[in-house]
RNA sequence: GGCAAGGUAGCUCAGUCGGUUAGAGCACAGGCUUCAUAAGCCUGGGGUCGCGGGUUCGAGUCCCGCCCUUGCUACCA
């Protein structure tokens, strides 16, 4: 078998947000596949980079008052920290904002020009005069022209579902600066991808490069009609690379992002004395390129990207592996539910190996969505990894610490040989990205091994000194079966492979290590290999996720900060209560809308006003409120307030207070009574 | 609305070219065991394979219709 040369990529994470569990589906999937290829002895490099360009990065850097370079440097560090904690091992992790990438962009661009595919057209877009930038649809909000719903994004209305152009919005506002955008026209550069239509049809439909459902999707959606020209430039200001033959214009982020795969490879080549052309030019023995991406970016990777590569005379992907989205407990990840868990949050509570294994058991070759069911996560990890796999070692290793493994491999009824014979079938599952099938096969092996231990019962044999050899033999078999499983699982659980290597004093480096049992070697002192998942830890992570959730997109950061300038002082003065209250706790407090029918100074009181409140109908409440420093009695009469109506009555120096009026603020002049929006009536309960 | 994928045990899923009595793991019930961080082994209950028709000696599997779920799409990309 000649070793294949394989170049593998994951999609480039955007330098605008942290890595979360959804991202990790892809990086773990790719990393498993790469580790598998390496274990098999193939020449395989795993290439990735940060995707650093675009409006969102530019805006966010501005808001943080620092350069884009400083911002993307920080984010890169955070990304790398997360990846390495999850054992995602890149051969090179570059940046689209590198000279390597600029160089490749130039080359591809030159080819596109030379092929006559680039044309100019004017594009009219909303422009923010204050932020001095053109606005993508999602950076504009206004009133829906169809149904008048306020606060809708520039492209469609989520109230009535209609779609429109941002220019049609009533009272449009830039979410970046709060300014009113104006229409402006600017020159853009387009790639006439339609000229490659026939070739793309053939390439996508050939059945080798894409999953069937993806090929069908493209056929029905894009390839069934003329392909629209692709807008690949943005006018300044834009954080990116300026187009050399079109000063003032920058390549759109989606132009240089996939090229980042090549740019990052170039960086790796420079560091390792390799030639870029050996990997990206179709030579006599071309490298296989494999892209792993999520289904949301199918379009870019299956139409534009191949078109660019083809035009530039570069190597086309052997296969684009497309996966689905992550859901948690059957629902979309949600910040409020705490299921939008960042990688760093996960790491505070749980072991990364657990997630690698769980994802492996759920990943198939199709682009189905993957559900992280938290309860299943715990039971699966516990019963498979701790109960079956690790348990093999922990129930036998101690018995042979002193004597080591038998000097010849004992009769095990063919267990090891049969499991070794399954290597090809397991390898085929890995190769085809059917990790879930691979895990099933491997766990069946672990079941058989546990049954063997049970039948041999070395703990019983051990009581009879005459049978010491039998104990050693039973443990030799079990530990070899364990090691064999550790080899098969090595792409998924590199740490377990290392631990098994240490325990049995023999490194696991190749897939073939599964084929020959170890004999006559010593066994080190046994240490626990893996802890169980406690459901409480999982819940703690979800709670934590609720706290750490926000801060991801420039959009989210932009909306509150610019128009309102809300600072953190208030919440810092009185931090949020960490402990939750239940809905039952909440309904114990009976809050009511009340009318102030009379208000008076209290003689002898420094802070109090005496209020007479009506909840409608007969009767009134007498309430003393400590708001004298901020309100005059005459200003209060007639207005509505919110009253805690079932607060226990309290006898005060000046009389009995029958409730409490709700107000916010630090005290002194800073007291702000709550009042309901107009329409509320005295007696209404606050829910 | 259009396109795609799916609907199999309580849950997550496998089921090849149509072929005996439809499978696995988890969960559940009972038993055994007590080496292993409450781990392990055995046994068992549990299914109208979404619904209706058709082809066939034979359909979870192929064909037609319908219902439902999810995703994509509907302006842009």
Image: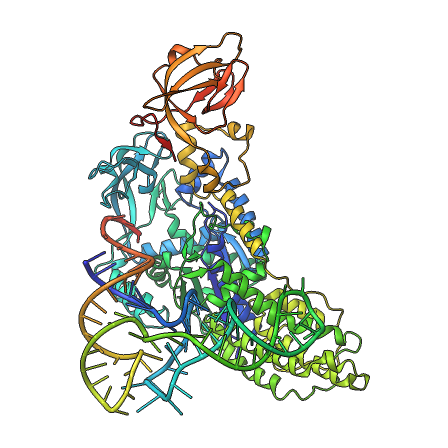
Which of the 4 image quarters holds residue A617?
Answer: top left
- Can you give x and y, in whole percent of width and height, for residue A338 in the image? 48, 48
* Residue A28 is at least partly visible in this image: no
Which of the 4 image quarters holds residue A178?
Answer: top left
**Is A299 on the left or on the right of A539, as rendered?**
left
* Residue A106 is at least partly visible in this image: yes
Where is A512 relative to A167, above or below?
Answer: below
- Can you give x and y, in whole percent of width and height, for residue A461 in the image? 74, 82
Task: Judge by depth and name the residue closer to the eye, A97 or A416.
Answer: A416
Q: Please name the colour scheme applied to the rendered image.
A: rainbow
Q: Which residue sits furthest top? A: A603
**Is A590 on the left or on the right of A274, as rendered?**
left
Q: Which residue sits furthest right? A: A465
Task: Judge by depth and name the residue closer to the eye, B43 or A277.
Answer: B43
Where is A376 relative to A57, above or below?
Answer: below
Task: Judge by depth and name the residue closer to the eye, A116 or B77.
Answer: B77
Where is A290 relative to A346, above or below?
Answer: below
At 41% from the left edge and 36% from the top edge, which residue is drawn?
A558
Q: Which residue sits furthest front? A: A618
At 22% from the left edge and 36% from the top edge, which residue is drawn?
A148
- Can you give x and y, in whole percent of width and height, for residue A677 in the image? 33, 27
- Can you give x and y, in whole percent of width and height, for residue A368 in the image? 38, 64
Which of the 4 image quarters holds residue A284?
Answer: bottom left
Where is A560 relative to A35, above or below?
Answer: above
At 69% from the left edge and 87% from the top edge, which residue is drawn?
A410
């Amino acid at each position: 078998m000649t070793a294949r040369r394989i170049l593998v990529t994951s999609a480039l994470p955007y330098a605008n947000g942290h890595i979360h569990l959804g991202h990790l589906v892809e990086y773990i999937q790719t990393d498993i596949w790469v580790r598998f290829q390496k274990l098999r002895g193939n020449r395989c490099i795993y290439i990735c980079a940060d995707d650093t360009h675009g409006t969102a990065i530019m805006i966010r850097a501005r808001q943080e008052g620092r350069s884009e370079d400083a911002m993307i440097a920080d984010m890169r560090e955070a990304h790398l920290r997360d990846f390495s904690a999850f054992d995602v091992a890149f051969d090179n992790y570059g940046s689209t904002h590198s000279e390597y990438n600029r160089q490749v962009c130039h080359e591809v661009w030159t080819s596109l020009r030379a092929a006559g595919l680039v044309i100019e057209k004017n594009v009219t877009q909303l422009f923010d005069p204050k932020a001095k930038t053109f606005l993508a649809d999602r950076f504009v909000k206004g009133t829906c022209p169809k149904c008048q719903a306020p606060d809708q994004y520039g492209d469609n209305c989520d109230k009535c579902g209609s779609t429109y152009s941002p220019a049609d919005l009533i009272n449009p506002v830039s979410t970046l600066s709060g300014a009113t955008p104006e229409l402006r026209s600017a020159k853009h550069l387009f790639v006439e991808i339609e000229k490659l239509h026939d070739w793309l049809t053939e390439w996508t439909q050939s059945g080798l490069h894409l999953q069937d459902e993806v090929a069908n999707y493209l056929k029905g959606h894009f390839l069934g009609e003329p392909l629209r020209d692709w807008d690949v430039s943005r006018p300044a200001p834009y954080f990116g690379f300026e187009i050399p033959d079109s000063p003032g214009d920058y390549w759109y982020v989606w132009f240089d992002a996939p090229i980042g795969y090549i740019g990052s490879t170039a960086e790796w080549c420079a560091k390792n004395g390799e030639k870029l052309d050996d990997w990206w030019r179709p030579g006599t023995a071309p490298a296989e390129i494999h892209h792993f991406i999520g289904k949301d970016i199918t379009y870019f990777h299956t139409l534009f990207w191949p078109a660019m590569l083809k035009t530039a005379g570069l190597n086309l992907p052997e296969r684009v592996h497309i996966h689905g989205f992550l859901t948690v407990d059957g629902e979309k990840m949600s910040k409020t539910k705490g299921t939008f868990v960042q990688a760093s949050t996960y790491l505070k509570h749980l072991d990364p190996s657990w997630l690698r294994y769980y994802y492996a058991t759920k990943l198939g070759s199709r682009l189905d969505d993957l559900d992280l069911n938290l309860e299943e996560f715990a039971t699966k990890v516990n019963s498979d990894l701790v109960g079956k796999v690790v348990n093999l070692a922990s129930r036998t290793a101690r018995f042979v610490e002193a004597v080591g493994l038998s000097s010849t491999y004992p009769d095990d009824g063919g267990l090891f040989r049969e499991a070794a014979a399954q290597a090809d079938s397991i390898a085929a599952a890995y190769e085809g990205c059917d990790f879930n099938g691979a895990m099933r096969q491997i766990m069946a092996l672990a079941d058989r091994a546990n049954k063997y231990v049970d039948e041999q019962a070395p703990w019983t044999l051990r009581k009879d000194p005459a049978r010491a050899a039998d104990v050693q033999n039973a443990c030799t078999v079990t530990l070899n079966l364990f090691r064999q499983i550790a080899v098969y699982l090595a792409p998924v659980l590199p740490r377990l492979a290392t631990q098994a290597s240490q325990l049995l004093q023999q490194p696991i480096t190749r897939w073939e290590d599964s084929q020959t049992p170890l004999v006559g070697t010593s066994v080190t002192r046994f240490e626990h290999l893996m802890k169980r998942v406690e459901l409480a830890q999982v819940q703690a992570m979800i709670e934590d996720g609720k706290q750490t959730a926000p801060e991801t997109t420039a959009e989210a950061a932009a909306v509150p900060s610019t128009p309102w300038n809300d600072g953190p002082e208030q919440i810092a003065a009185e931090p949020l209560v960490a402990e939750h209250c239940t809905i039952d706790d909440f309904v114990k407090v009976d809050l009511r809308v009340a009318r102030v029918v009379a208000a008076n100074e209290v003689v002898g009181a420094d802070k109090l006003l005496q209020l007479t409140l009506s909840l409608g109908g007969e009767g009134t409440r007498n309430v003393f409120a400590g708001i004298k420093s901020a309100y005059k009695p005459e200003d209060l009469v007639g207005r509505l307030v919110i009253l805690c109506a079932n607060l226990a009555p309290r006898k005060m120096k000046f009389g009995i207070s029958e409730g409490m009026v709700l107000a916010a603020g630090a005290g002194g002049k800073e007291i702000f009574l709550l009042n309901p929006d107009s329409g509320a009536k005295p007696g209404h309960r606050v829910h």
